[in-house]
Image (tube, rainbow, N blue to C red):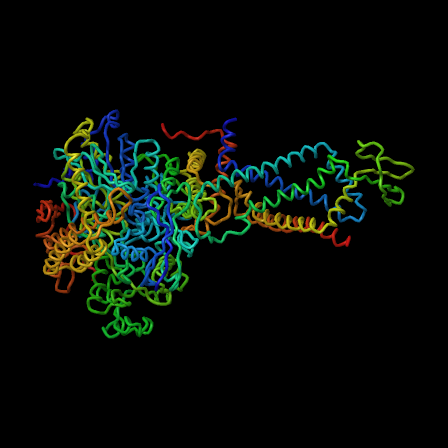
């Protein structure tokens, strides 16, 4: 099939970008969306035109590297998949597809469709961990964890850090991402000692990065490729207010 | 050059403990005077960087992805083995050791594998302490499953994404050290060379994938944790970015490359649909527990299936060939990965393949659905069926899946001794990047185990010994070797950017992949390999004449990144072919047609090939020199595998 | 103290203020509706006028009332601050608007809130301000025969301009003289555009609370498998249906019964 692509092209963070229209010809319905872009890029290279830059890596929906805001949906129109798992049979011949990068102050464009998501790393670095050194830990079965709690924590832990929640949110809020980690560790017994310092540190970093605020529109959970639920945000809020208003400990200073 | 594996003396079970005591320690006050470079942030890299930083060393960690969390360890589905014996089913460190050695077809070192089995139990403890949400029983304790045909349940798992959860655990430990300032993290940065000063690795040259800046980094030691090279086949289950560049450039600086031809081909992958295909997707081999593998009995039937004149369900029972059940009555569909893969290939070579391309066999669940009910099958394999449906648009509940083997893991890699040191002092290789623990075939659920064992529990001890030996004197960044190596990298990039030919880098890569798959894949012959060598040499020469590399260095340039990686694959491919040609035996995943039993099964040749083949780079376009490290088996008895 | 400042300056802290003020305003609506149901009593405004008088002359209620006004201002102000901050979080918009299946009201709380704020200004200007700070509201005298419990009413013109209200008993007849806010209501609700304004505002209330009530609970972190469905039920049926319909019924009933 043949398609028309309207693609955001931007040389780097410093220069302004614009939409450029390309023809994608001879596209097989079996191709993934990224393979379709590969084909377009191959033809661009043959014409000595600059290929479209986009982030991608594992191409099986787990690394969280691919992004792309396609026709108004992060990761395209289908539920619970990433762009690399989107196949061209979703589209029909002659369709026009608009492809944009994630849009957020905290995610500056690097080039074309690739954005810088290091803000997510910095939030995790602020406290998204259990402070244990290698070695000297108790036997794994010494900590019994009710299956429902383990499963719930697992659901939160499935976040792949792709940023679709930020891209989907009308406020470019990162709360679904932050709350997924806060909830995972907040539910597990291993995470209890730092539960209230962690949430404070991570929220503070989130604010510093310039993300917007959650208004509970639920767009994030609808677009999340791993179906992380909005309940996580509620849990994070609860822990945060509990820490700030009812506990005496301050933000734990991790620099010992 | 003689290869000294530095295996400690003494009984197998005491080697590691004794060795840990014999290793020199670095004075705690001196640790902060050492800089360690860690390249790659997968399971091995992230765990090593975090653990070394915890000890007090200054660590600089590098990854080409936008975040350390995205390394391809994340894609591992199945699980991680550990000899915990939580299930009381007779597992032990010795049994895990034995299974791994045997699974590797007796081409790994006993001492290394024993240590791996020994520390496997610590890995699980460590991960649980970090908050990794492993599957649990209703009583709150950890759940295990049997995996990859193992007789005991020793595999720990986190639904279908154990790799992601383990990596996020290591990533969190890494983040903690980044926050403390003990690790300096460089993302979107690719290592392009190792700087060797007076025979010792003292730093690396990197390129920023954002600005194109070429930088020099000094360190007292360099740890390569850069994964495997499966992408030499173009199509593999590896990530698009997975590459051999770091390991290969290290090889060209003197590090030996061991057993390059040992690659693992996974039998249950979704087949190729066309030229556009960029990667292959693996489905857990647990599918073979209930699915039956078959192909049509006759070429005519297969022909009709390929032209869609027939549906799989139209084919009568007597016209189907359940070839694994027929040939291996006692193991049936559960034969090891290599056997299942090779037999599927035979069917396709026999022109009995199915699907539009004819390069696939069926994996049928009709009987399982009849026996267990659709719901029970869905409960077990629902997510895999959904994934298959998503990719192929075919419903595996109503028609059989099409599967075909795909390259999945590379057992070969940089040669390392017992301390994980390459033959270049100061240069270490961890995880899939080294060759050490899996022999000629890796068992399911042991890749994650090895990556974390190396990073958490081996390198923190063994590196100290080297560091204590060289002392904490700062590395002199003004040594001419740094400027010289940097200049060579700059020149190499300029040479790539000057390529303004007619063929895209991707086209070269795809061609290389086809050659490798055809001649250096599951079944090999001396004749085919010789031919492949010529083809690769010609392709490489053509690449340096006619490839197109777009853009400039001082910008985000995927075209340039790609070109550098493919250029290295074009060199590695030839070495793999050399190694495969040299290894005139069938072992592990590799079938040499010249070496088979009268029944057509793989025939290992322990008399001539019980060694590690480590290759030494001798200059551009020069034949490499083979060094042999003999494998001595004191504890296990070498037997021919038999699955009849 | 700086700890609290920091808390309420954080993104979550600002949301906490929105949630708490919002929920306070919600509880007020229940009281307001309850009292205003007196408008449906066919007593020529006796009950309603007494109620209005009570609200404006009982000191504790006065305090709560000013707290309420403060909440309205703070809720609006923080909405503005958060909106500005949220806009800044995405300086370059999308060419194709997001098509996630988020409800219309959840994405348009600002618009709905603006409508409500305008409405509140008009509404308070018309009743509260005129009642409290001007002499434009006339007085009425209610005479209740305590023996028969029948009430008659008549206009009353106070002697002093400072007169507020009085209650006295003469010959078994209770005489109550109060400001006749009811007449003001009748007058306003006879005007078509005013009725339309009210109905539109109540639609806005409905949608604002359909999202706002349950969203406030989420913001506070009060999510629970057992209780969240109850919150959603109350938010939908009480705050998005019963309350707005109750309020909207008043101008409609008055308009149509007087025409």
Relative height, residue B33 to residue C73 (above, below): above
Residue sticking out furthest to the top: B29
Q: Quadrant of residue B165?
A: top left
- Name of the residue lying farthest toward the right: C171
Residue A242, position as x, y percentages in the image? 50, 35
Picture coordinates of residue B128, whole percent (x, y):
35, 41
Residue B95 visible in the current orientation? no
- Which quarter of the rendering shows the C terminus of chain C? bottom right
Q: Quadrant of residue A192?
A: top left
Using the rendered image of the protein, determine whether residue B289 is visible from the camera's viewpoint.
yes
Judge left or right: residue A255 versus residue C78: left
Q: Position of residue B123 (x, y in %)?
A: 30, 41
Residue nearest the viewer, comparing B346 with B474: B474
How many numbered markers are drawn?
Answer: 0
Left or right: residue C67 compared with residue B353: right
Above or below residue B182? Residue C124 is: below
Left or right of residue C57, residue B438 in this image? left
Q: Nearer the viewer, residue B293 or A73?
A: A73
Relative image position of residue B293 (x, y in whole percent):
28, 65
Does residue B248 appear to the left or right of C199 in the view shown? left
């Amino acid at each position: 099939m043949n398609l028309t692509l309207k693609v955001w092209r931007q040389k780097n963070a410093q220069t302004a970008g614009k939409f450029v229209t390309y023809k994608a010809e001879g596209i097989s319905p079996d191709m993934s969306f990224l393979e379709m872009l590969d084909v377009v890029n191959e033809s661009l290279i043959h014409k000595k035109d600059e290929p479209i830059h986009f982030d991608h890596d594992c191409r099986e929906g787990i690394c969280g590297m691919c992004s792309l805001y396609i026709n108004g949906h992060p990761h395209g129109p289908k539920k619970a998949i990433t762009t690399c798992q989107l196949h061209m049979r979703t589209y029909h011949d002659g369709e026009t597809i608009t492809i944009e990068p994630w849009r957020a102050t905290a995610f500056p464009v690097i080039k074309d469709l690739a954005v810088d998501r290091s803000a997510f790393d910095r939030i995790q670095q602020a406290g998204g961990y259990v402070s244990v050194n290698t070695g000297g830990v108790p036997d794994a079965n010494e900590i019994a964890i009710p299956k429902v709690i383990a499963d719930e924590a697992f659901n939160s832990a499935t976040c792949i850090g792709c940023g679709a929640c930020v891209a989907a949110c009308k406020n470019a809020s990162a709360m679904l991402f932050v709350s997924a980690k806060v909830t995972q560790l907040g539910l597990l017994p291993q995470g209890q000692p730092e539960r209230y310092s962690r949430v404070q540190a991570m929220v503070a970093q989130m604010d510093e990065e310039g993300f917007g605020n959650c208004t509970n529109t639920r767009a994030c959970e609808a677009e999340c490729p791993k179906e992380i639920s909005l309940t996580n945000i509620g849990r994070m809020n609860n822990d945060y207010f509990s820490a700030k208003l009812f506990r005496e400990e301050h933000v734990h200073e991790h620099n010992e | 050059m003689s290869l000294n594996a530095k295996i400690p003396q003494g009984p197998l079970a005491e080697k590691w403990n004794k060795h840990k005591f014999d290793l020199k320690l670095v004075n705690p006050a001196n640790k902060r005077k050492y800089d360690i470079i860690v390249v790659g942030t997968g399971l091995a890299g992230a765990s090593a960087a975090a653990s070394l930083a915890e000890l007090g060393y200054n660590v600089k960690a590098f990854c080409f992805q936008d975040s350390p969390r995205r390394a391809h360890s994340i894609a591992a589905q199945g699980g991680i083995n550990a000899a915990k014996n939580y299930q009381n089913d007779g597992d032990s460190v010795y049994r895990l050791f034995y299974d791994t050695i045997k699974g590797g077809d007796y081409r790994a070192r006993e001492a290394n594998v024993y240590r791996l089995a020994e520390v496997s139990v610590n890995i699980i403890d460590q991960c649980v302490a970090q908050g990794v949400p492993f599957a649990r029983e209703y009583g709150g304790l950890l759940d295990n499953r049997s995996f990859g045909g193992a007789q005991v349940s020793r595999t720990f798992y986190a639904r279908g994404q154990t790799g992601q959860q383990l990596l996020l655990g290591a990533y969190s430990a890494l983040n903690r050290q980044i926050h403390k300032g003990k690790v300096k993290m460089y993302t979107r940065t690719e290592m392009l060379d190792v700087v060797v000063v007076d025979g010792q690795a003292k730093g690396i040259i990197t390129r920023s994938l954002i600005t194109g800046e070429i930088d020099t980094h000094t360190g007292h030691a360099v740890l390569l944790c850069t994964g495997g090279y499966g992408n030499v086949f173009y199509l593999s289950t590896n990530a698009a970015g997975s590459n051999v560049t770091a390991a290969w450039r290290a090889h060209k600086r003197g590090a030996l490359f061991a057993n390059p031809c040992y690659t693992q081909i996974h039998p249950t992958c979704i087949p190729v649909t066309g030229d556009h295909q960029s990667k292959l997707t693996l489905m857990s081999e647990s599918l073979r527990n209930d699915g039956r593998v078959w192909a049509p009995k006759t070429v005519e039937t297969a022909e009709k299936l390929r032209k869609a004149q027939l549906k799989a369900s139209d084919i009568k029972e007597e016209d189907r060939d359940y070839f694994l059940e027929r040939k291996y009555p006692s193991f049936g569909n559960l034969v090891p990965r290599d056997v299942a893969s090779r037999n599927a290939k035979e069917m396709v070579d026999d022109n009995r393949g199915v699907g539009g391309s004819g390069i696939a066999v069926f994996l049928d669940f009709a009987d399982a659905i009849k026996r267990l009910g659709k719901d029970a099958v869905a409960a077990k394999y629902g997510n895999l069926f959904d994934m298959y449906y998503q990719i192929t648009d075919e419903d595996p509940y109503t028609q059989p899946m099409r599967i075909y083997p795909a390259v999945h893991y590379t057992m070969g890699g940089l040669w390392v001794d017992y301390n994980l040191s390459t033959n270049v002092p100061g240069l270490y290789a961890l995880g899939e990047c080294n060759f050490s623990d899996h022999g000629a075939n890796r068992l399911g659920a042991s890749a994650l185990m090895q990556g974390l064992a190396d990073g958490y529990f081996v390198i923190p001890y063994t590196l100290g010994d080297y560091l204590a030996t060289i002392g904490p004197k700062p590395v002199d960044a003004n040594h001419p070797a740094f400027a010289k190596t940097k200049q060579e990298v700059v020149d190499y990039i300029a040479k790539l950017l000057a390529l303004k030919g007619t063929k895209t880098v991707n086209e070269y890569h795809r061609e290389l992949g086809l050659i490798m798959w055809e001649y250096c894949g599951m079944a090999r012959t001396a004749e085919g390999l010789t031919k492949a060598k010529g083809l690769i040499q010609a392709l490489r020469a053509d690449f340096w004449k006619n490839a197109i590399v777009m853009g400039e260095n001082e910008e985000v340039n995927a075209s340039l990144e790609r070109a550098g990686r493919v250029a290295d694959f074009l060199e590695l491919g030839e070495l793999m072919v050399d190694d495969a040609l040299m290894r005139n035996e069938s072992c592990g995943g590799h079938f040499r047609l010249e070496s088979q039993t009268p029944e057509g099964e793989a025939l290992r040749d322990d008399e001539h090939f019980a060694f590690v083949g480590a290759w030494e780079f001798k200059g551009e376009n020069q034949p490499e020199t083979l060094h042999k490290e003999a494998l001595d088996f004191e504890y296990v008895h070498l037997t021919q595998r038999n699955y009849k | 103290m700086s700890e609290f400042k920091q808390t309420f300056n954080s993104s979550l802290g600002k949301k906490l203020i929105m949630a708490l003020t919002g929920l306070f305003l919600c509880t007020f609506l229940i009281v307001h509706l309850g009292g205003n149901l007196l408008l449906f009593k066919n007593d020529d405004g006796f009950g309603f006028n007494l109620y209005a008088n009570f609200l404006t002359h009982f000191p504790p209620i006065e305090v709560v009332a000013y707290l309420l006004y403060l909440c309205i201002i703070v809720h609006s102000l923080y909405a503005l601050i958060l909106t500005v901050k949220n806009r800044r979080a995405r300086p370059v918009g999308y060419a194709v608007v997001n098509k996630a299946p988020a409800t219309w009201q959840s994405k348009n709380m600002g618009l709905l809130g603006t409508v409500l704020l305008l409405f509140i200004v008009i509404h308070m200007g018309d009743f509260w301000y005129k009642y409290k700070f001007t002499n434009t509201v006339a007085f009425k005298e209610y005479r209740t025969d305590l023996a028969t419990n029948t009430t008659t009413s008549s206009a009353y013109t106070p002697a002093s301009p400072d007169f507020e209200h009085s209650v006295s008993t003469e010959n078994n007849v209770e005489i109550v003289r109060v400001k006749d806010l009811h007449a003001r209501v009748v007058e306003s609700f006879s005007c078509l555009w005013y009725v339309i304004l009210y109905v539109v505002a109540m639609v806005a209330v409905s949608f604002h609370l359909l999202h706002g009530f349950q969203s406030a609970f989420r913001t506070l972190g009060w999510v629970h498998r057992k209780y969240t469905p109850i919150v959603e039920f109350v938010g939908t049926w009480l705050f998005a249906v019963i309350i707005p319909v109750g309020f909207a019924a008043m101008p409609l009933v008055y308009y149509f019964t007087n025409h």
